[in-house]
Image: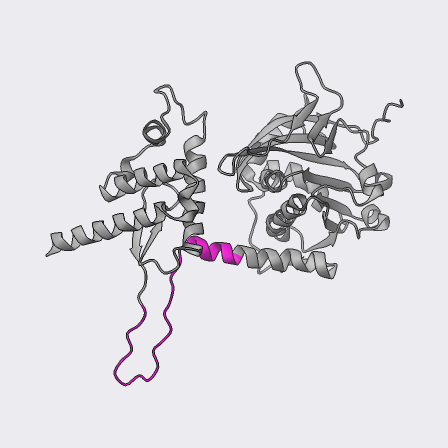
Amino acid sequence: MIEATMVLELEASSAQIQRILQSKAFRTSEVHRNLLSYLAEKSLAGEADSLKEYTVGLDVFAKPSSYDPRQESTVRMHVARLRQKIAEYYRTEGLDDPIIVDLPKGGFRVTFEPRQAAAVPGESEAVAEPTKIVRPTRYWFEVVLVAALLLAVGAALYFGTKWWQVSGQESVAVEWTPELKALWEPLIAENRPLIVAVSTARPESSSAGAASGVFRLGEFLGKLKTHVQVLQSDQIEAPEVAMGNVVFLGKMVENRQVRAMTEGRPFVLDAAGIHNTQPLSGEPALFADRPPADPSDTEESYALISRVPGLYGNGQVLYLSGNRVASITGGVQAFTDPEFAKTLVSRMKDASGTVPKYYQVILKVRSMDDMPIEISYVLHRAISPAPATPATK
């Protein structure tokens, strides 16, 4: 009886995988169909827990025997995208499927869980209880994330002002590493207001990236400083910039005085990417964004991070900018992650072992579906308090 039950469960799980593979969500992505088929087969056979990234690379992606997962992130990238596509399937076509398939982080094992059935009404019940639909955990995470993002950003963009207020008892400690301190202390240690200015620039991808960045930045700064004000960047006035420290998110094209603080700097962001106005030997003059040729491919874009003095030399201004959603969110992620901050600070230290007070940094962001999957340092420049005067033609 037990063996018969197991056979039925295996057959039902295999049928569910076939249902997913034939769905619209997977129809246009052969690579993810192959990956899901492979991982499901190994999981049903009880072999998934012993799978290694190297083996998956060879078996699914036909990598050569010289393939080194430490140097190439193909498998990690597509496994992350596969999780997204499974979640997408259950939000749409798979709402009523009897089995929930998931691919938990940290391994390659596919899980199969029966959907919770509707309660069977008793004979005395006149009305049946509504059916409960159980969706994957990731679905609810995304719902909460979107809701929180709307609360944090919607108020800022549509009602003008938003304050994060965290009492000492409610605040959760940030892992305040020496590297994060080097990056952020000049902005939060001074007795000056801290303002986050969110871009509303076109194209929409830039403002969407700024919105995503605000959510992550809000979590980070809300634990370090009691009050952080969020304003729409085209609403911020010169006295506010002069009196406070400011973090700008997105493309700052709406405000002439704001733009002037970055003019004449070594790196300049425009629609094509980041221009290197003073390239050293071997450096390109342009770091061009490369949108994916196919929706299933990765995107490459560049984030430009600039810390410059505020108006009239007062305070600190930090720009986290880019043309794409992923470049903006990737810049915020890099600047708030303890491990990446360690890498970044080690690259930026000068001969005396300190981080320049003012600087510009270029980061390369590989992403899929606007989600950063790999962020890497490209180069930086220490800059003087006063911008160089642009050459006259």
Q: Which residues are magenta?
A: 118-144
Coordinates of residue 72 in the picture (x, y in percent): 45, 27
Coordinates of residue 175 in the picture (x, y in percent): 55, 44
Marker count (numbered)? 0
Question: Could you tell me if residue 189 is visible in this image?
Answer: no
Residue occupying the point 37% across, 24% down? 63
Q: Is residue 30 above or below residue 233?
A: above
53 or 191: which is nearer to us?
53
Q: Residue furthest top?
A: 281
In which quadrant of the rendered view does residue 361 lie? Answer: top right
Q: How is the image coloured?
A: one colour
In which quadrant of the rendered view does residue 347 lie? Answer: top right
Question: Of helix, strand and loop, which mostly describes the magenta segment?
Answer: loop
Q: Is residue 7 above or below residue 333?
A: below
Coordinates of residue 144 in the picture (x, y in percent): 52, 58
Coordinates of residue 45 in the picture (x, y in percent): 22, 41
**Which quadrant would the N terminus be assigned to in this image?**
bottom left
